[in-house]
């Protein structure tokens, strides 16, 4: 059996845009999907975020945009890994990166921005973080 080659998304997408791209996997035709995005002018349309992206992008990005849509429809798109923060719910502290010391530290959200990494990256740093991982954005 011949496996289809997978492709990373060529453009950067927000969580809402990634959610819409995943919905495109339900379509049979990439051109029909492109049409649905171009026609999505009302706020309750599931593709409004992609329509806004299309309307504001530079023309040089249009080819990559259509390629990403094609790969999403055909099931050959590689979506980015979900990001997580490490949160100790007992102390309400997060793992943050201290740029001056170039190390990780525990801090409250008010004083620093929590470090975001994939689950695999966090577990490589410290497997004990697994029970404290919280997903940053829900893009499914």
Image (tube, rainbow, N blue to C red):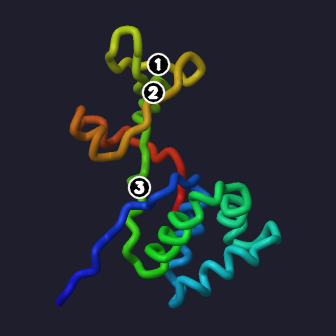
- Residue drawn at (58%, 53%) of the image: 14
What residue is disc 1 on?
107
Residue 131 in the image, given as x and y percentages of width and height = 33, 42
| Residue 57 position by quadrant | bottom right
Numbered-mark total:
3
Tell me if label 2 and label 1 are in contact, CB under 8 Å: yes
Mark seen at residue 89:
none
Of the numbered discs 2 and 3, the one sitting upstream in the chain is 3
Mark 1 or mark 3: whose residue is earlier in sequence: 3
Could you give the CA–CA distance between mark 1 and mark 3, rounded to whole angstroms?
Answer: 27 Å
Spot occupied by residue 69 in the image (x, y as percentages of width and height): 52, 72
Q: Is residue 97 left or right of residue 120?
A: right
Give SS at disc 3.
loop
Asked which secondary structure carries label 2, the reply is strand
The residue tagged 3 is 80
Residue at 61%, 87% in the rendered image: 32
Q: Look at 35% across and 9% down and name the residue there.
A: 101
Contact check, label 1 and label 3, Cβ < 8 Å: no
* Number of residues whose C-alpha sits closer than 10 Å to that of mark 1, classed few (under 14), some (14–19) or many (20 or more): many
Distance CA(mark 2)–CA(mark 1): 5 Å
Give the label, 1 or 3, closer to the camera: 3
Residue 23: image location, x then y, percent: 55, 75
Whether tag 2 and tag 3 are in contact, CB under 8 A, the answer is no
- In this view, the residue farthest toward the top is 100
Q: Which residue is mark 2?
A: 94
Q: Quadrant of residue 42?
A: bottom right
Residue at mark 2 to residue at mark 3: CA–CA distance: 23 Å
Q: Secondary structure at mark 1?
A: strand
């Amino acid at each position: 059996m011949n496996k289809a080659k997978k492709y990373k998304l060529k453009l950067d997408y927000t969580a809402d845009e990634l959610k819409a791209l995943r919905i495109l996997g339900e379509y049979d035709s990439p051109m029909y999907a492109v049409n649905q995005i171009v026609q999505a002018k009302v706020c309750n349309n599931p593709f409004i975020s992609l329509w806004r992206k299309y309307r504001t992008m530079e023309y040089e990005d249009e080819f990559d945009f259509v390629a990403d849509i094609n790969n999403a429809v055909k099931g050959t798109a590689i979506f980015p890994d979900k990001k997580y923060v490490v949160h100790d719910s007992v102390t309400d502290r997060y793992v943050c990166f201290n740029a001056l010391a170039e190390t990780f530290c525990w801090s409250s959200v008010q004083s620093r921005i929590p470090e975001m990494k994939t689950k695999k990256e966090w577990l490589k740093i410290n497997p004990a973080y697994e029970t404290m991982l919280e997903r940053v954005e829900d893009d499914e």
